[in-house]
Amino acid sequence: MGDQVQEGKAARFGLVVAGSCWLTTEQPAQSVPLATGDCYVILDGSTYTLGDDPRSPALNCFDVVPKLVDGAVSLGGGGTAATVVTGWFVYDELGARPLTALLPRVLHAASTSYRTDILKATLELLAKETERPGVGSGVVVSGLADILFVQAITQSPQQHQRK
């Protein structure tokens, strides 16, 4: 599935609220272990999986969305349990290109990294605002997405290495 949308490029983000899991991207193949409190941002919006093991079979998120109950989907069983808040935001690809060209595709902020609490708070606000949108939610989400983007960049230990 393409992740390109008319307004710009879609970036994916997530916060591991409980447990642990693996984030795996396809192109290029990369697996990152995530623990409680870890955050990630995938700048190019490419396909990724979350699972108990990088080799575990995965389901397409569009196939499980109909299973939403109160904004959550429960999947799997038998592996390591994890609760992950995920979402996406759109940014101006052309305007962001000078910055994104310098960054790795996956920004990972471990729960032990400096200022992680601020990043987690922003993700939690973003998740709450998108959970039940109201008047002005678009403006709030846009501002929080900008803040999240800057925070993720400053949190990432590989911030000056392009992968």
Image (cartoon, helix red, strand yellow):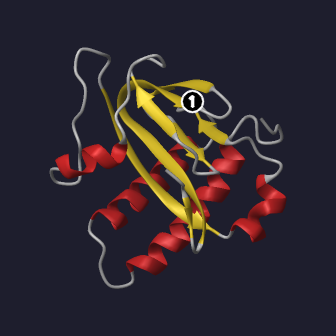
Q: Is residue 33 above or below residue 10?
A: above
Q: Is residue 77 left or right of residue 23?
A: left
Residue plotted at (48% across, 80% down): 139
Q: Is residue 118 left or right of residue 149?
A: left
In percent of width and height, residue 141 lies at 46, 70
How many discs appear? 1
In percent of width and height, residue 34 lies at 49, 27
Residue plotted at (48% across, 57% down): 88
Residue plotted at (46% across, 33% down): 49
Q: Which residue is most to the front?
A: 1
Q: Which residue is most to the left?
A: 69
Which residue is the site of mark 1? 112
Residue plotted at (32% across, 85% down): 135
In percent of width and height, residue 68 lies at 20, 50
Q: Which residue is most to the bottom?
A: 135
Q: Is residue 83 left or right of residue 117?
A: left
Q: Is residue 92 above or below residue 50?
A: below
Locate the C terminus and report the quarter of the image it occupies: top right
Asked whether 93 or 140 is in front, the reply is 93
Q: In the figure, residue 133 lies in which quadrant?
A: bottom left
In percent of width and height, residue 144 lies at 52, 66
The residue type indicated by label 1 comes to Thr
What is the crowding at mark 1: few (fewer than 14 residues within 10 Å), some, or many (at least 20)?
Answer: few
Q: Is residue 79 above or below residue 2?
A: above
The secondary element bearing badge 1 is classed as loop
